[in-house]
Amino acid sequence: MIDSQGQRKSLQSHRRGGPPWSLITGLEKLNEGQYRIEANRDGKLIACYPLTLGESGQQERPPAWNLATEAFYSAWIEALFGAPPEENLSFNSLEPFLRNTERNFLHNYLGINEDNNLPLTPDCADLPYTLRAYFAWKTGLPIAFRTCGCGSSKAPPYCGKPNIMTEFTRGISSQANFKKFSRRLTDTVHSGSARTGLADEATDLYPISLSRETLWPGTVYADPYGHILVLVEWVPQTVDRPGMLLAVDAQPDNSVARKRIWEGTLLFANTENAGPGFKAFRPLISTAPGKWRTLANEELIAHPEFTSFSLEQDYFTPDDFYARLAKLINPDGLDPVQVYEATLTALAEQIETRVNSVDNGEAYFRKNPRSVIPMPSGAAIFQTIGPWEDYSTPSRDMRLIIAINVLNSLPEKIVCHPGLFVLKDKTPEEAKAEIEQYHAKRIQERNIRYTRTNGSSWELSVAEVLARKPAYEMAYNPNDCAEIRWGAKPGHSGICHLPPLCASRSTRENGAIPDLVS
C-alpha cells in the first residue's frame, strides 16, 4: 500500500482461487486521503488499484459485466463462504454471511450503512439470484431475470422476455430500493428458472463445459429435480488430503449451508423435462447509454469476456458426468480408502443437515403447539408454499436415499471405474473386497445425534441410519414426531413415549401414530 506521501507498507494477504485468483487483505485505522494498492510478482507490477478514503471519496465502480467483474464476483463469493474445508459452515439464513464484515468485503461498500438490518432470507431457487443482485447493487451493474413456467413431464420450463433492471447503474441506490427490487425478484424466480433447456435462448442461465477453467465460484448447478447449488470454492488435492469442490445451497426454511460436491448432493440425469447441469448467468452488454441486452448462445461461444456456451453436458450419461467431475476434483486419482472416507464424511454432513431440518420443524410446533400443517396431495409434496415447504423434507430425503446408495455402491465403482483410483499393485476386485470390509467397520464407528420428542439427545450410528433407508421414503412429514422421521419403530430401543399431542399431529393416510414406548 502506498499513501499520498509515497510511504510504502507491505500487506499480509490471503490468497484464494485459481482461476480466478485473488488476494484479499484487511486495512484498519487509515486516515482520509488517497492510497494505491499494488500487486507485484517477481518484482514486476501486475495490478494497481486506487483507493480514496473519506466522505468525498467514491470507490471505483465497474462500467459493465466483463471478465474482470465476473472474476470480482467469483472472488466475492469465495470470500463470503470461505472457511477451513473441515468446518461445518451453516447458518439459519443468508443474513449472518452478509453481515459478517470479515466475510463480506462489500459490506457497507456504498458508504450509506446500507447493510444495517438488511433482511435477506432466500430459499433454494432464490439464493443464486439474490447473491447476483446484491453484488450488482453494490457495484452498480445491471441485472436481468425472466418470468418462467414450471415445464411439464415432457418439456423443460420456458421463460419470457428478460426484465432488465438498470437502476443500480445510475448511481448509489438505497437499501429501500434494493429491498423493493429483491422482493420482486424472489416473487418471480423459482426452481424452473434454472432448469430451462440447455439449448434454449430465452434463459437467465446458460450451460458451460466441465473444466477447472470454467467452473468458477458463483457458477450455478441446477439438478433435474429442482434443487440448486452455487459453487464457492475448489480445495486442491494434496498428498495428505483429497481435493474438494464446495458449494452452498439454501433450504425452504431459509437455512444456508456449505457442502462438498459429490453424487449425494449433485444429482444428474438425462431427462426431457429439464436442462440439468452447471450454468453461468447470461451476461448483459450495453447497446447505448442506459440500454442493455442479453447475449445469445451463439454470441457466447468463445467470447473473450465470458465463459463459453457449451452443450457438452447434454451428451453425458450420469456415469460419464460423475466420472468427469471426480477427475477434475482429484486429477491424480485417490486411494480407495481416501475416497471412502471422503464419501462417508460427505454423507455424514448430509445427515447432519437433515438433523437441523427436522429440528426446525420441531421448533415450529413448539411455537405453534396445536397446529397441523396441511399435507399436499401427490407430486405437490415437492412443490408448494407455506409451512409445508419450510419444514417438510421430501426432496432432501430423496437426496439422502441417493447418497446412501452412493456410499453402498462405492466398492462396485472401483471395478467399474478403476482409472479414478490409485490401486498400486491391487486388482480392482481385491480393492473392492477390502473396501467392503472397511465399510462394514466404519459405519459402526461413525455416529450422529438427533433430538427426540422429549428434548433428549439420541445417538445413531451411520450403520443404523443406513439400515433405516426404507423409512426415509415416508419420513418427510413435519407433522410426524422426530422419532418417526428418523425411522424408529415401535419396540426399538431409544424411542421415547410420544405425548398425545404428538400422535395427533400425524397426517398420514393410515391414521394416528401408535404410542411408541422404549
Image (spheres, helix red, strand yellow):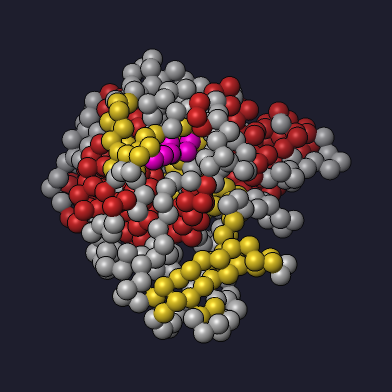
Q: Position of residue 126 (x, y in %)?
A: 32, 43
Q: Which residue does the image show at 37% across and 26% down from the upper left? A: 202
Q: Is residue 228 visible?
A: no
Residue situated furthest front in the rendering: 288
Relative placement, left or right, of 288 versus 119 is right
Which residues lie in the magenta part? 279-286
In the image, residue 311 lies in the stretch drawn in magenta: no
Q: Position of residue 296 (x, y in %)?
A: 44, 28
Q: Which residue does the image show at 46% across and 57% down from the upper left? A: 76
Q: Which residue does the image show at 56% across and 84% down from the upper left? A: 7
Towards the viewer: 144 or 85: 144
Above or below, comparing residue 254 to residue 455 in the picture: above
Towards the viewer: 260 or 12: 12
Above or below, comparing residue 468 to residue 240 in the picture: above
Towards the viewer: 4 or 167: 4
Above or below, comparing residue 357 to residue 11 in the picture: above
